[in-house]
Amino acid sequence: MRLPLLALLAKEPAHGYELKQALEQIFGSAYPSPNIGQIYVTLGRLEKDGLVRGVDVEQSNRPNKKVYYCTAAGREALDEWAESPSEGPRVRDEFFMKLVLAPMTGIADRMALINRQRRHYLAIMRDLVEVAEQTDQDNRAAHLLIEGAMLHLQADLDWLERCQEELA
Amino acid sequence: MSPANEPGPTTAAVQAVNLVKVYQTGGLPVHAVRGVDLRVDRGEFVAIMGPSGSGKSTLVHMLGGLDGRTSGEIWVDGKRADTLNESGWAILRRQKIGFVFQFFNLVANMTVADNVELPALLGGSTPRHARERREYLLGELGLADKADASPAQLSGGEQQRVALARALANQPQVLLADEPTGNLDSRNTRDVLRLLGEVHRQGQTIVMVTHDARVAGLADRLVTLLDGMIVDDGAIAPPRRRTKPGAGDVVELRG
């Protein structure tokens, strides 16, 4: 969450709660509502690394609030983020380890493992279909995010099918 | 055979008992379906998955009488169906079964509207009811403005959606489908998903062969075939209860 927060701060200075609201508004229901504590912890780390600076702003009748700015070093970190390609998704290592090791150790039947995993993926898909239904049709970012998750699941299911054909 | 698989007084929408299909084309016999027991209750939505060549299509084709069985029984709505002749199957399909394939088989010299209304009219609907049902289905599939077009004027994805509307026109006892989203792009698939979800909530029984996980994710139950046999048959867990509606977790947050 470091760099997305930094990107929001590069747009305009904000305090923690405003950042939480901005994330919710931009990504909608497809994104888990960020925990305010987590946001403050992340802002604290960014400040320690010199990428943001927090300034106390006095408020009448209320405790001071801390508004964060993106620093020059923060700007550089963002440029670097934008310029470097993101990691591609990797195969579900944990399931694969189970699948390969199961017959050696006798802990499970491969066919049963694959069948259980397939139904689990479809249950996740079912969740995603519901999230999509509940997401504002106009929130294109949220729908693209959901679609991306669905395509990944499809690939996982296709791969399970290959495992079943090869190993069964 | 488990008691749940025996044809009994509580009628299944459709049921296969020790169903076998052996193709004898040319040299060696091909065992496409090897003893399948499957009972689908009314209102269930069953997705059938499995690698190509696992017998999925052959199974649903047999359930709809479009492909003859080698041995075993097929029951539709409590009546033995595998012993029917071709015209018997044709009548049964008209009354009880909606079928949608990867290829659409629309009648070329009829309009889209007539293609969709025809099965309802053959099934005994009044013209008014058939028209209302057609308007509803085409509307849900984003095809309201194509009612007067001929099938040849439509794209592959549009023809496929018309075929789905036609299969549902009659509110059949059971909808059998073989890869019904094979030709659709994401947006059209979304319309089809919404309609399938809706008719299922209204009680439509659905048995669907699909590779598309989005479609399979709508089902209550998943049946997996491998080498002509069922290797898995079980419920798909319902969506998790959310404390706050719409608060999803599509992505993982990391601090």
Image (cartoon, coloured by chain):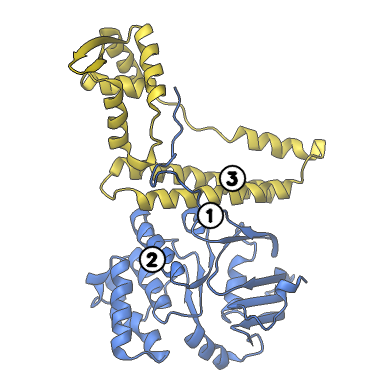
Can you identify the residue that label 1 sits on?
A: B238
Question: Is the residue under label 2 in contact with that under label 3 (CB below 8 Å)?
Answer: no
Nearer the N terminus, badge 2 or badge 1?
A: 2
Residue B134 quadrant: bottom left
Q: CA distance from mark 3 to mark 1?
A: 23 Å
The correct choice, above or below, for B7 with respect to B238 in the image is: below
Q: Position of residue B200 (x, y in %)?
A: 46, 68
Indicate the chain coloured yellow by its letter: A
Seen at 58% across and 72% down, the residue is B60
Q: Is residue A162 above or below residue A63?
A: below
Q: Which mark is residue A49?
A: none
Q: Please, which chain is the residue tagged with disc 1 on?
A: B
Question: Quick check: B50 above or below A147?
Answer: below
User: Residue at 34% across / 81% down in the picture?
Assistant: B115
Helix, strand or loop for disc 2: helix
Image quadrant assignment for residue A85: top left
Q: Residue at x 41, y 17 (%)?
A: A41
Quadrant occupied by the N terminus of chain B = bottom right
Disc 3 from disc 2: Cα separation: 28 Å
Distance between the alpha carbons at the discs numbered 2 and 1: 19 Å
Q: Which of the numbered marks, if any, corresponds to residue B195?
A: 2
Q: Which-is-in-front pick, marks 3 and 2?
A: 2
Badge 1 local density, few (<14 within 10 Å), some, or many (20+)?
some
Whole-percent x and y of residue B110?
Answer: 30, 83
What SS does tag 1 mark? loop
User: Pointer 3: what residue?
Assistant: A159
Write down which chain is painted blue. Answer: B
Res A144 visible = yes
Q: Quick check: do tags 3 and 2 share a chain? A: no
Q: Is residue B126 left or right of residue B44?
A: left
Looking at the picture, tell me which residue is in the foreground, B136 or A61: A61
Q: Amino acid at mark 1?
A: Pro
